Image: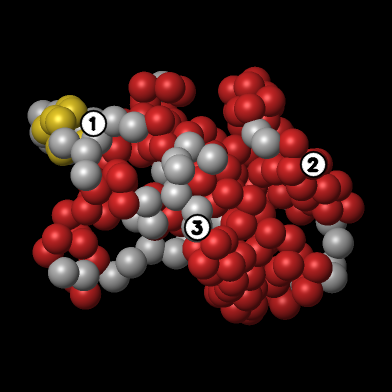
Amino acid sequence: MLGHLKPRICQLSPASKQHYQHLYCSICASLRQQFGLSASLLINHELTLSLAAFPEISALETQTCACPAKLFWQQKPIVHHQLIDKAAQLCLLLVWLKLLDWEVDCPVFYKKTLRLHLEKKVQPILAQLSPAARQFIDSYLLLIRANTTDFHTNAKMSGLLAQHIFQELGQKTENTQHAMNNLTFLLGELITFADALLDLKQDLATQQF
Protein backbone atom coordinates (compact mmCIF):
# COMPACT_ATOMS: atom_id res chain seq x y z
CA MET A 1 0.00 0.00 0.00
CA LEU A 2 2.44 2.63 -1.19
CA GLY A 3 0.95 5.04 -3.68
CA HIS A 4 -0.29 2.52 -6.25
CA LEU A 5 -3.86 3.78 -6.55
CA LYS A 6 -4.49 7.31 -7.73
CA PRO A 7 -7.38 8.86 -9.64
CA ARG A 8 -7.37 9.77 -13.30
CA ILE A 9 -7.32 13.50 -12.71
CA CYS A 10 -8.52 14.24 -16.24
CA GLN A 11 -11.75 12.31 -15.57
CA LEU A 12 -12.66 14.13 -12.34
CA SER A 13 -15.02 17.07 -12.21
CA PRO A 14 -13.26 20.45 -11.68
CA ALA A 15 -14.48 20.56 -8.06
CA SER A 16 -13.29 17.01 -7.30
CA LYS A 17 -9.97 17.64 -9.02
CA GLN A 18 -9.42 20.77 -6.93
CA HIS A 19 -10.40 18.97 -3.72
CA TYR A 20 -8.02 16.08 -4.42
CA GLN A 21 -5.17 18.51 -5.17
CA HIS A 22 -5.85 20.40 -1.92
CA LEU A 23 -5.71 17.15 0.06
CA TYR A 24 -2.53 16.00 -1.71
CA CYS A 25 -0.75 19.31 -1.14
CA SER A 26 -1.99 19.45 2.47
CA ILE A 27 -0.50 16.03 3.32
CA CYS A 28 2.73 17.04 1.57
CA ALA A 29 2.95 20.25 3.61
CA SER A 30 2.24 18.34 6.83
CA LEU A 31 4.97 15.81 6.02
CA ARG A 32 7.48 18.65 5.57
CA GLN A 33 6.38 20.36 8.75
CA GLN A 34 6.51 17.22 10.90
CA PHE A 35 9.43 15.32 9.39
CA GLY A 36 11.47 17.66 7.18
CA LEU A 37 11.69 18.58 3.51
CA SER A 38 12.70 15.12 2.22
CA ALA A 39 9.55 13.59 3.75
CA SER A 40 7.55 15.13 0.89
CA LEU A 41 8.75 12.20 -1.23
CA LEU A 42 6.86 9.79 1.02
CA ILE A 43 3.33 10.98 0.22
CA ASN A 44 0.75 8.24 -0.32
CA HIS A 45 -2.07 8.40 -2.86
CA GLU A 46 -4.26 5.90 -0.98
CA LEU A 47 -4.24 8.09 2.11
CA THR A 48 -5.08 11.12 -0.02
CA LEU A 49 -8.06 9.21 -1.43
CA SER A 50 -9.06 8.07 2.07
CA LEU A 51 -9.17 11.67 3.30
CA ALA A 52 -11.75 12.44 0.62
CA ALA A 53 -14.20 10.24 2.58
CA PHE A 54 -14.28 12.77 5.43
CA PRO A 55 -16.63 15.67 4.57
CA GLU A 56 -15.35 17.87 7.39
CA ILE A 57 -12.11 18.34 5.46
CA SER A 58 -13.89 19.88 2.48
CA ALA A 59 -15.51 22.49 4.74
CA LEU A 60 -12.17 23.93 5.90
CA GLU A 61 -10.84 27.22 4.56
CA THR A 62 -7.71 26.95 2.42
CA GLN A 63 -4.44 28.73 3.13
CA THR A 64 -1.43 29.20 0.91
CA CYS A 65 1.88 27.44 1.37
CA ALA A 66 5.13 27.57 -0.60
CA CYS A 67 5.62 24.42 -2.68
CA PRO A 68 9.26 23.24 -3.03
CA ALA A 69 8.35 21.21 -6.11
CA LYS A 70 7.45 24.33 -8.09
CA LEU A 71 9.87 26.82 -9.59
CA PHE A 72 10.49 29.80 -7.28
CA TRP A 73 8.45 28.13 -4.51
CA GLN A 74 5.05 28.75 -6.04
CA GLN A 75 2.21 29.10 -3.52
CA LYS A 76 -0.26 26.19 -3.28
CA PRO A 77 -3.61 26.09 -1.42
CA ILE A 78 -3.66 23.74 1.58
CA VAL A 79 -5.79 23.08 4.65
CA HIS A 80 -4.69 22.36 8.23
CA HIS A 81 -6.42 19.67 10.28
CA GLN A 82 -5.40 16.99 12.77
CA LEU A 83 -6.78 14.40 10.34
CA ILE A 84 -4.28 15.54 7.70
CA ASP A 85 -1.42 15.44 10.21
CA LYS A 86 -2.45 11.88 11.12
CA ALA A 87 -2.52 10.91 7.44
CA ALA A 88 1.03 12.28 7.04
CA GLN A 89 2.20 10.17 9.99
CA LEU A 90 0.58 7.08 8.49
CA CYS A 91 2.38 7.79 5.20
CA LEU A 92 5.65 7.50 7.09
CA LEU A 93 4.53 4.27 8.77
CA LEU A 94 3.64 2.67 5.42
CA VAL A 95 6.97 3.63 3.86
CA TRP A 96 8.80 2.11 6.84
CA LEU A 97 6.86 -1.14 6.41
CA LYS A 98 7.65 -1.17 2.70
CA LEU A 99 11.36 -0.58 3.32
CA LEU A 100 11.42 -3.49 5.77
CA ASP A 101 9.71 -5.68 3.17
CA TRP A 102 12.25 -4.66 0.50
CA GLU A 103 15.10 -5.32 2.91
CA VAL A 104 13.84 -8.83 3.67
CA ASP A 105 13.30 -9.61 -0.04
CA CYS A 106 16.73 -8.39 -1.10
CA PRO A 107 19.07 -7.27 1.70
CA VAL A 108 21.14 -4.27 0.64
CA PHE A 109 23.01 -1.86 2.91
CA TYR A 110 21.24 1.29 1.71
CA LYS A 111 17.80 -0.23 2.35
CA LYS A 112 18.74 -1.02 5.93
CA THR A 113 20.16 2.48 6.37
CA LEU A 114 16.96 4.11 5.10
CA ARG A 115 14.80 1.83 7.21
CA LEU A 116 16.77 2.57 10.39
CA HIS A 117 16.64 6.30 9.65
CA LEU A 118 12.85 6.19 9.42
CA GLU A 119 12.49 3.82 12.36
CA LYS A 120 13.38 6.56 14.86
CA LYS A 121 10.57 8.73 13.51
CA VAL A 122 8.11 5.85 13.28
CA GLN A 123 8.38 4.71 16.92
CA PRO A 124 6.29 7.63 18.29
CA ILE A 125 3.71 6.98 15.56
CA LEU A 126 3.47 3.31 16.56
CA ALA A 127 3.02 4.34 20.18
CA GLN A 128 -0.01 6.48 19.24
CA LEU A 129 -1.84 3.72 17.37
CA SER A 130 -4.91 2.09 18.84
CA PRO A 131 -4.24 -1.24 20.60
CA ALA A 132 -5.96 -3.14 17.77
CA ALA A 133 -3.89 -1.41 15.07
CA ARG A 134 -0.64 -1.89 17.00
CA GLN A 135 -1.40 -5.58 17.48
CA PHE A 136 -2.08 -5.94 13.77
CA ILE A 137 1.16 -4.13 12.83
CA ASP A 138 3.05 -6.60 15.03
CA SER A 139 1.41 -9.48 13.13
CA TYR A 140 2.18 -7.78 9.83
CA LEU A 141 5.84 -7.42 10.80
CA LEU A 142 5.99 -11.15 11.56
CA LEU A 143 4.56 -11.85 8.10
CA ILE A 144 7.16 -9.62 6.44
CA ARG A 145 10.05 -11.21 8.31
CA ALA A 146 8.76 -14.71 7.55
CA ASN A 147 8.87 -13.77 3.84
CA THR A 148 5.94 -16.08 3.12
CA THR A 149 5.08 -17.04 -0.46
CA ASP A 150 1.42 -17.66 0.41
CA PHE A 151 -0.15 -15.15 -1.98
CA HIS A 152 -3.67 -15.29 -0.53
CA THR A 153 -2.35 -14.62 2.97
CA ASN A 154 -0.36 -11.65 1.66
CA ALA A 155 -3.43 -10.27 -0.14
CA LYS A 156 -5.63 -10.62 2.95
CA MET A 157 -3.04 -8.97 5.18
CA SER A 158 -2.68 -6.13 2.69
CA GLY A 159 -6.44 -5.65 2.85
CA LEU A 160 -6.41 -5.66 6.64
CA LEU A 161 -3.52 -3.19 6.66
CA ALA A 162 -5.50 -0.79 4.47
CA GLN A 163 -8.53 -1.23 6.72
CA HIS A 164 -6.59 -0.55 9.92
CA ILE A 165 -4.93 2.51 8.41
CA PHE A 166 -8.33 3.93 7.47
CA GLN A 167 -9.71 3.15 10.92
CA GLU A 168 -6.81 5.06 12.47
CA LEU A 169 -7.84 8.09 10.41
CA GLY A 170 -11.45 7.59 11.53
CA GLN A 171 -10.44 7.97 15.17
CA LYS A 172 -9.80 11.64 14.48
CA THR A 173 -13.38 12.29 13.40
CA GLU A 174 -16.86 11.76 14.81
CA ASN A 175 -18.12 10.16 11.59
CA THR A 176 -18.55 6.39 11.37
CA GLN A 177 -17.23 4.97 8.13
CA HIS A 178 -18.42 1.34 8.01
CA ALA A 179 -18.86 1.26 4.23
CA MET A 180 -15.42 2.80 3.71
CA ASN A 181 -13.86 0.26 6.07
CA ASN A 182 -15.09 -2.53 3.81
CA LEU A 183 -14.05 -0.68 0.67
CA THR A 184 -10.53 -0.02 1.93
CA PHE A 185 -10.10 -3.72 2.75
CA LEU A 186 -10.97 -4.60 -0.85
CA LEU A 187 -8.65 -1.89 -2.17
CA GLY A 188 -5.83 -3.22 -0.01
CA GLU A 189 -6.31 -6.67 -1.52
CA LEU A 190 -6.49 -5.17 -5.01
CA ILE A 191 -3.11 -3.49 -4.52
CA THR A 192 -1.48 -6.86 -3.88
CA PHE A 193 -3.00 -8.37 -7.05
CA ALA A 194 -2.13 -5.31 -9.14
CA ASP A 195 1.44 -5.25 -7.84
CA ALA A 196 1.90 -8.94 -8.65
CA LEU A 197 0.59 -8.46 -12.20
CA LEU A 198 2.79 -5.41 -12.82
CA ASP A 199 5.92 -7.31 -11.72
CA LEU A 200 4.95 -10.69 -13.16
CA LYS A 201 7.63 -10.99 -15.89
CA GLN A 202 10.41 -9.71 -13.65
CA ASP A 203 9.38 -11.94 -10.74
CA LEU A 204 9.26 -15.02 -12.95
CA ALA A 205 12.71 -14.19 -14.35
CA THR A 206 14.25 -13.72 -10.89
CA GLN A 207 12.27 -16.52 -9.18
CA GLN A 208 10.69 -13.99 -6.80
CA PHE A 209 7.22 -15.51 -6.56
Task: Say which element carries label 1.
Answer: loop
N-term mark: 1 or 2: 1
Residue that label 3 marks: 177
Q: Is residue 206 above or below residue 119?
A: below
Task: Say which element carries label 3.
Answer: loop
Residue 36 vs residue 26, the one in the foreground = 26
The residue under label 2 is which amino acid type? Gln
Residue that label 1 marks: 68
**Residue 117 image-quadrant placement:** top right
The residue under label 3 is which amino acid type? Gln
Residue 75 vs residue 115, the one in the foreground = 75
Q: Is residue 6 left or right of residue 65?
A: right
Q: Position of residue 138 (x, y in %)?
A: 80, 41
* Residue 69 shows in this picture: no
Residue that label 2 marks: 135
Q: Position of residue 136 (x, y in %)?
A: 76, 47
The residue under label 1 is which amino acid type? Pro
Q: Residue at x 16, y 36 (%)?
A: 61
Q: Residue at x 60, y 56 (%)?
A: 162
